[in-house]
C-alpha cells in the first residue's frame, strides 16, 4: 500500500503533484498538509490500521512560476494516446515520427511530431505521408493544456475517479461520456 499515489493540491486547490504514500504521510505528520479525501482501503501499520489519503491539500500556498507545456517524447505519446497516428496500433513501444521530414525542413514542433509504430515508421522512412501513400488519423497540434501536472501524469490522474473533481478539464482530453 505504501507505493500508492496521492494527489497533492496547493492551498488554492490547484493540482501540484502526484506523490507516493510515504511522501504524503510525511507531509501530514509534519503538519504541512491536510487530508481532503481518503482511500477505501486503510493502511496497515505496526500499531494497527490507519486511513490512507487519496488527496491531500497543502496548508500554505506553494509559489511557483506558471508551468509551460514541454515538448517531449512522453508528451507527444500521451497527446496521441499511445496510438500510432498512421495505422492505429496501440502500445508503449512506439516511436516519434516527423510528419514533414527534417531534411525537407520539418521542425521539432507539436504540429510536426506524431506517435508512430515501428512498422509505419519504417514504411514512411524519410518521406512525407503523401509520398509514402499514408494518411494521418488526425492533424497533430499543440494541446490547449495548462500543465499543472505533466501531460502523461495528468492523463494518468484523469483515470482516477476520486481525483477528477480536482483536475482541470480540457476538451481534447475529455473522458468519454458513458451515459451517451
Image (cartoon, rainbow, N blue to C red):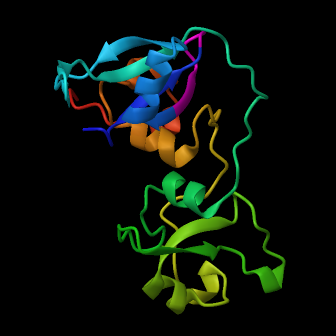
Residue 151 appears in which quarter of the rendering?
top right
Which residue, as the protein is rendered here, is positioned at the far front? 46
Q: Residue at x 65, y 73 (%)?
A: 99
Q: Is residue 92 left or right of residue 61?
A: left
Is 154 included in the stretch rendered in magenta?
no
Position above or below: 68 against 26: below
> Residue 84 occupies which quadrant of the picture?
bottom left
In terms of image quadrants, where is residue 107?
A: bottom right
Identify which residue, 78 or 24, lies in the foreground.
24
Say which residue appears at 74% left-offset and 61% top-offset.
109
Residue 87: give x, y in percent of width and height.
40, 74
Please give the name of the residue rendered at 53% of the width and 84% of the height, measured from the top-left corner: 121
Count the labels in the image: 0
Task: Point out residue 67 in the picture as x, y percentages from the top left corner.
Answer: 73, 35
User: Picture coordinates of residue 113 (x, y %)?
Assistant: 65, 66
Q: Residue furthest right?
A: 105
Image quadrant holding the C terminus, namely top left
The quadrant the N terminus occupies is top left
Magenta residue span: 11-17
Q: Is residue 111 left or right of residue 20?
A: right
Q: Is residue 3 above or below residue 130?
A: above
Please state which of residues 178 and 74 is positioned toward the viewer in this rendering.
74
Where is residue 17 drawn, in percent x and y?
54, 32
Residue 139 visible in image: no
Amino acid at each position: 500500500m505504501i507505493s500508492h499515489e496521492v494527489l497533492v493540491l496547493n492551498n488554492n486547490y490547484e493540482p501540484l503533484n502526484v506523490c507516493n504514500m510515504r511522501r504524503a504521510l510525511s507531509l501530514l505528520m509534519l503538519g504541512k498538509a491536510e487530508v481532503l479525501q481518503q482511500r477505501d482501503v486503510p493502511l496497515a501499520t505496526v500499531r494497527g490500521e490507519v486511513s490512507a489519503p487519496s488527496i491531500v491539500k497543502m496548508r500554505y500556498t506553494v509559489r511557483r512560476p506558471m508551468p509551460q507545456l514541454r515538448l517531449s517524447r512522453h508528451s507527444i505519446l500521451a497527446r496521441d494516446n499511445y496510438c500510432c497516428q498512421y495505422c492505429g496500433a496501440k502500445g508503449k513501444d512506439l516511436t516519434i515520427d516527423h510528419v514533414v521530414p527534417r531534411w525537407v525542413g520539418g521542425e521539432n514542433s507539436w504540429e510536426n511530431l506524431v506517435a508512430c509504430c515501428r512498422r509505419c515508421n519504417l514504411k514512411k522512412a524519410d518521406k512525407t505521408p503523401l509520398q509514402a501513400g499514408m494518411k494521418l488519423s488526425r492533424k497533430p497540434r499543440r494541446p490547449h493544456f495548462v500543465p499543472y501536472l505533466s501531460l502523461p501524469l495528468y492523463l494518468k490522474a484523469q483515470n482516477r475517479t476520486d481525483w477528477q473533481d480536482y483536475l482541470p478539464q480540457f476538451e481534447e482530453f475529455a473522458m468519454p461520456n458513458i451515459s451517451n
